[in-house]
Amino acid sequence: MAGEPTVAEKLKNLFELQTIDSKIDEIEILKGELPIEVSDLEDEIAGLETRINRLNEQIADFDSEISKHGANIKEAEALIERYNTQLDNVKNNREYDALMKELEMQNLEIQLSEKKIRGVEKDKERKAETLEANQERLDRKSKDLATKKVELEEIIKKTEKEEQKLRKEAEKWRKKIEDRLLRAYDRTRTNYRNGMAVVTVERNACGGCFNMIPPQLQLEIAMQKKIIACEHCSRVLVDDTIAAEVTGETEAA
């Protein structure tokens, strides 16, 4: 059964993981905001499509309503024609008054239906303008999405194999690191935009926040007897020898 790794081995494992994660970060930087932009555009387009479908349904309802009022007008006109024919054959004033009342009612029915048609047509016109504006926006967003997808696919095509390889390597090194250290490493990485959780001492200063490291602490770091974090930024500090060893192995690989 393998023994407990030494502090030097733990530091080397952490630096190995940091080196690989930094390369993955570089690929993500190369992709930039494209994945987020593509996702946002897809959501926006889905919303526009839903809105356009709803507008089309509303316009169809307006057409149906206009058709219904048009049918009412035709029916009233047919009745008016029939009543006018009956006027030629009235036998008394009572029949005449009744027919004139029916004619008046049908004329009012026509006027009311025509008024409703005008109102519905105005509503339909407004909806059609809104539909046109939304359709133009959808066309623009669809073109933007197609362009950004091509850009993203080209980047993915160039980096996919390398990224997959790096992620497998990162997983391998993560398994070598104890959970407590791994949690601290991940937490520190998320705290900084450059994702650096393990750094070397450069020119007597922390390679992450550039605050000076006291000589005694630098000596302890070089001895590799315990894991030491920068008191200012909490990044793990490693000696140049570990960095050189990891870099040498990477170049050889």
Image (cartoon, grey):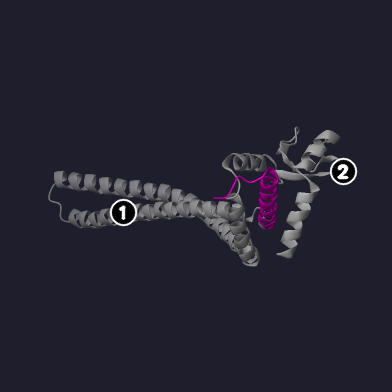
Disc 2 is placed on an element classified as loop
Q: Residue at x 28, y 56 (%)?
A: 77
Q: Which mark is residue 68?
A: 1
Question: Which image quarter: residue 245?
Answer: bottom right
Across and down, in percent, residue 11 comes to 69, 46
Magenta stretch encompasses residue 251: no
| Nearest the eye: 35 or 117 | 35
Q: What is the span of residues highlighted in magenta in the rendered image?
A: 1-30
Across and down, in percent, residue 176 comes to 60, 50
Across and down, in percent, residue 168 comes to 59, 58
| Nearest the eye: 180 or 43 | 180
Q: Which mark is residue 203?
A: 2
Q: On screen, 233 above or below 75?
A: above
- Give the main secondary structure of the magenta stretch: helix
Horizontal arrangement in the rendering, residue 118 relative to residue 209 (left or right): left
| Nearest the eye: 68 or 244 | 244
Q: Amino acid at mark 2?
A: Arg
The C terminus - image quarter = bottom right
> Marks 1 and 2, Cα distance to the nearest angstrom?
86 Å
Q: On screen, 180 above or below 174?
A: above
Q: Residue at x 28, y 53 (%)?
A: 72
How would you rate the neighbour count of disc 1 (Cα within 10 Å): few for under 14, some for 14-19, many for 20 or more?
Answer: few
Across and down, in percent, residue 199 comes to 75, 45
Foreground: disc 1 or disc 2: 2
What count of labels does the image hold? Answer: 2
Disc 1 or 2, which lies upstream in sequence?
A: 1
